[in-house]
């Protein structure tokens, strides 16, 4: 189909205003029908470009983050665990902790929603235009090990240090070995008071030190993680078990899963 305004289209392409080029014909019809002024018409076009660019950047940040698309705060089932301090979660979702550069620690049994809640907070931060990385403890330590083998350890560590929010899921699910505990300690030490780290764990607070083979490293690492941290405890029955025992009208079992 021939563009109704070929001269304008060519200029917009040269300026790389691709989204304006996509909507200019539609906005021109609206301007005529609603008798918009030239500034009003131009404002609509510029808003189209900005919104489209913001959405594209959001999609890029989400892809880089590793977050699951459906693990949002809107999809989190607060009613399953009425003990959750919803006011605290909403406050954290505003992103103030990012600028405080303090950790968030989430503990609780398997299936109570820790991973979903952590990722939901990650989504909120991404929507604010900031970078987030979500990774399990196991994968994190494997990536650092692989980076060391190929001589890219410092580069990988610095990349993990700079991200505004690093979410480490399933801390302590597998006990660390040397030098994994040293890698974990250094990462937390580098991020301390520089960026926010969110950690989830099945372990009770008193058991976190057991994930380290070296208790001196455990004390030093956990001291930094706990300093001024927001703590969230999710207790109660497993969401998965509850779902298995209750008839589910949703034919897709993945749709309501929380971890």
Image (cartoon, rainbow, N blue to C red):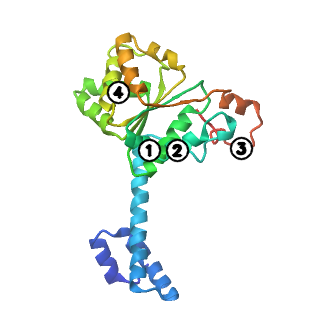
Q: Which mark is residue 188?
A: 4
Real-space Cα separation, disc 3 to disc 1, in angstroms:
36 Å
User: Which residue is label 3 attached to?
Assistant: 250
User: In percent of the image, x 55 and y 37: which residue is there?
Assistant: 116
The mark nearer the N terminus, 4 or 3, is 4
Labels 2 and 3: the sequence-earlier one: 2
Residue closer to the observer: 77 or 233: 233
Mark 1 to mark 2 CA distance (whole Å): 8 Å
Q: Residues within 10 Å of mark 2 (few under 14, many from 20)?
A: few
Residue visible at 51% across and 16% down? 206
Viewer-nearest of labels 4 and 1?
Answer: 1
Residue 133, located in which quarter of the rendered image? top left
Q: Quadrant of residue 13?
A: bottom left
How many numbered marks does the figure carry? 4
Q: Report helix, strand or loop for mark 1.
A: helix
Work out whether residue 161 can be spotted. Answer: yes
Q: Secondary structure at mark 4?
A: helix
As rendered, which of 109 and 154 lies closer to the eye?
109
Q: Is residue 214 visible?
A: no
Going from the N terminus, do you reach mark 4 or mark 2 first? Answer: 2
Q: Residue furthest right?
A: 247
């Amino acid at each position: 189909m021939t563009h109704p305004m070929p001269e304008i289209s060519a200029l917009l392409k040269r300026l790389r205003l691709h989204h304006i080029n996509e909507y200019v014909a539609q906005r021109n019809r609206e301007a005529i029908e609603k008798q918009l002024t030239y500034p009003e018409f131009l404002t609509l076009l510029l808003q189209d470009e900005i919104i489209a660019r913001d959405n594209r950047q959001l999609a890029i940040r989400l892809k880089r983050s590793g977050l699951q698309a459906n693990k949002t705060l809107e999809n989190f089932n607060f009613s399953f665990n009425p003990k959750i301090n919803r006011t605290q979660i909403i406050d954290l979702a505003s992103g103030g902790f990012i600028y405080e550069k303090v950790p968030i620690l989430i503990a609780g049994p398997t299936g109570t929603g820790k991973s979903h809640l952590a990722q939901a907070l990650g989504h909120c931060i991404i929507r604010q235009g900031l970078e987030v990385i979500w990774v399990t403890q196991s994968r994190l330590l494997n990536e650092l090990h692989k980076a060391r083998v190929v001589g890219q350890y410092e580069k990988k560590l610095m990349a993990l240090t700079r991200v505004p929010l690093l979410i480490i899921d399933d801390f302590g699910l597998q006990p660390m070995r040397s030098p994994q505990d040293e890698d974990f300690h250094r990462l937390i030490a580098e991020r301390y008071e520089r960026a926010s780290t969110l950690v989830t764990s099945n372990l009770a607070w008193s058991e976190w030190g057991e994930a380290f083979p070296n208790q001196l490293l455990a004390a030093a690492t956990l001291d930094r993680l706990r300093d001024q941290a927001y703590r969230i405890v999710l207790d109660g029955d497993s969401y998965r078990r509850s779902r298995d025992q209750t008839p589910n009208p949703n034919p897709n079992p993945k749709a309501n899963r929380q971890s």
